[in-house]
Image (cartoon, grey):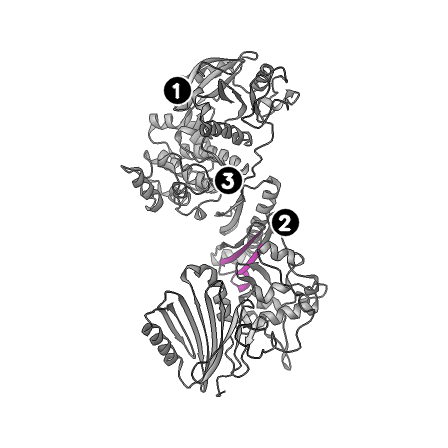
Amino acid sequence: MVDTWHVPGFTEVDVLGTGGFGRVVLAKHDASGRMAAIKYLRAEYLADARIADGFRREAWLLSGVRSAHVVRLFDFVETPDGAALVMEAVPGVSLRALLAAENVLAPESALAILKGSLLGLADAHAAGVVHRDYKPGNVLVSREGESKLVDFGLATLDGHNGLTAGSPSYMAPEQWSGQPGMPATDVYAATCVFYQCVTGQVPFRADTTEGLRSLHQAAPVPVDAVPEALRPLIARGMAKDPAWRPATAHAFVSELETVARKAYGKNWEKRGWKRLAASAAALTALTPLALLATAGTAAAPVGAGTAAGIAGGVGGGVPATGSGVGATAVIAGKIAAAVLVVGALVAGGVAIFANHDDPPAQAAALTVGLQTTSGRDPALPVTYDLQFPQVSGGPDPAVRQRINDALRAPVDKRLKAIRDGVAGNREMFQERGDTAAAHTTARILLRTPSLLSVRYDHDLDSDVLSHTTWRFPETVNVDLGTGQLLGPKDMFRPEVLTAAGMRTLTQRLEPVTKNGFCRVPTIDGAGEKVTIDAADRGSGTDHVPGAAIGFTATGAEFEIQWYDLGCDTASGKETVTLPYNGIGDLLLPKFLTMLGKPAPASSPPASPPPSTSVSPAPTTPSLGQSAQGPTYTNPRFGFTALISESYLATPYAPPNGEGMTFSSSDADATLTVWGANSTQSAAQAMAGAVAAVEADGGQVTYQKVEGDRYSVSGYQGDGKIFYERGFTGSASMAALRWVYPREDKDQFDGLVSSTVEGFRPGDLSRPH
């Protein structure tokens, strides 16, 4: 094999560049006279399966990207003598050459270049492709005032591992660790390049690769060298944790434009390109690409048709008509027989991949990140800083768009409500000189392959709109397979969405609330208790929970706004977590599968249990038996605790008292609940608990007394985490204690919190 091979039908004009694996040339299409850039792989590397496959993969990935800001791939051609990518030829120079000449760019110019290449990354991300090697040499600046991305040689499908490779000066912390490629990885690299554009140097320098790795992974971003107006943008884009960067390049563009307009005015982009025009044109004139001014670019070459003809007359080509989707958009016959999976050969020994064919069969993984929209309303005294999740990748762009629309909708709706509220009180805002500052933070509660559950916490700083109803939590649950929002009918069994079913749910929830469900005040005194049933608040409403519901790894989170259920406004709001053992039998089996939870064997009760408690008070279980129901109520001391049905119950006998220990062999965790006759104060009881832990070689890290209640936590002598909460009265006490491995802390935090909040100590004013 020799390097004299060239793509048939093209005549080489000049060499644009050479590298370790091949060369890039400017070539003229013989039939049309149009120019194209052709990237050749050296012949000897065709025998190296890893390199050859990488070259083919670059063609596959480029084929799925349709963007005015990415150099277009027209064809991929491979024979036993060579392989080549036939690409768009753009009259311009690399950002690397521009920086070599200018060293430092005006902020507006740097922002303009960054915006164009980010738009190219955004289109790549939308196709599920992560570039992984964004650097000055891979950004092309045209004399017409645009920037384009080139060279996807290290690209991967979003969420899939590639080589731990790239350009060290611009590699994100997760890339150094060999983690899967994600859009936020490209955002980091683009921000590093932007930093170089405005300062004249890369963000981090070191004498060794390991030193550079350490700086990228741990050192603070050196923003002091950056113009002050741009520091927040660079700090966001170079955040060590990808979750704190803009989730996608498209999100970064939005933030960039907000910063640019505020710092440099509405015409910043036009001024930025105007300042670059002279330098870009002068540098381009020194390259073979200057010929494109007269010869034209390969907007409609026929590489595929030419190669196909050589392959044995499989299909003939005609020039494309400028549709904007590449040279092969219009071809006489689709040459389907010639377009095979890359690496296969057709008659005559030529394989062609054209950019109108199907993308790789391997679907891009769906990834989730947080992004923020910030700004100031141009007509109203409103500022906003609103966070929301967005996804990238995934096999279906339409589903991805539906998911992102559903995840963005809460903040859009929130901003509209605030604008309407301010507009309706404009005079009062003017009199007080008030500005409504809206803030929303988003938190991913649960992500499974089928479902995404998100909580939004909406806050508002305003003297005029000061009512508590302007500050509330909200949840969104999305089916990742369809992009559809999930409502109560998608979650609960049909028999639960009835008056009787809502009473059952109310009784399940009440023990884990702080103060129980309130009673509606009447003229004669306290009236009936409110329920979770939305139908109780108005005629014609379905029997559904009157609260937003999110889902975590350990249970369902109910965001209850008590005033919405009929309580007084002072009751406020509360987050109530009901573990899956207390709600699983109320949920649809299909929905439990989406949550990654097993479906219970029994159906839920159609009406509340006859007892007024959530579950009948069980008799003391014998050793090895499970406690009955989602709660355990001790018949002697009367305390009630939320427990897990899967845990085994063993009697526990403290001095002057009794209780139960619930243990999980799988998780190596225990929950012990007990009551005892005692006249100790909370401080005395806590001191005894602390002394016992320290005597056993453990360490107490937190202790607090609040009236007749104490809390203490830390590490036992065996290294496990413990948490104890106790209540004391004039004649008795009640307490619970969790013990679990420290490595499982994240898994248990939610469960421990819900159990502690749901503990009811019983009557402590008398001995038992």
| Whether residue 448 can be seen here | yes
- Quadrant for the N terminus, please: top left
Q: Earlier in the sequence, mark 3 or mark 1?
A: 3
| Whether residue 301 can be seen here | no
**What is the spatial separation of the Cα atoms under label 3 and label 1, in whole angstroms?**
38 Å
Of helix, strand and loop, which one carries label 2? Answer: loop
Q: Earlier in the sequence, mark 3 or mark 2?
A: 3
Looking at the rendered image, the disc whose residue lies closer to the viewer, 3 or 2, is 3
**What is the spatial separation of the Cα atoms under label 2 and label 1, in whole angstroms?**
53 Å
Circle 1 crowding by C-alpha within 10 Å: few under 14, some 14–19, many from 20? some
| Amino acid type at mark 1 | Ala
| Residue 574 image point, x, y percent | 53, 66
| Residue 605 image point, x, y percent | 67, 69
Disc 1: which residue: 282
Looking at the rendered image, the disc whose residue lies closer to the viewer, 2 or 1, is 2
Circle 2 crowding by C-alpha within 10 Å: few under 14, some 14–19, many from 20? some
**What is the spatial separation of the Cα atoms under label 3 and label 2, in whole angstroms?**
22 Å
Disc 3: which residue: 158
| Residue 255 image point, x, y percent | 47, 43
Residue 716 forms part of the magenta stretch: no
Task: Pick the residue in front: 97 or 254.
Answer: 97
| Residue 307 image point, x, y percent | 57, 17
Mark drawn on residue 484: 2
The range drawn in magenta is 451-476
- Residue at x 37%, y 72% (from the top left corner): 703
Picture quadrant where residue 103 is located: top left
- Residue at x 53%, y 81% (from the top left corner): 638
Task: Pick the residue in front: 328 or 419.
Answer: 328
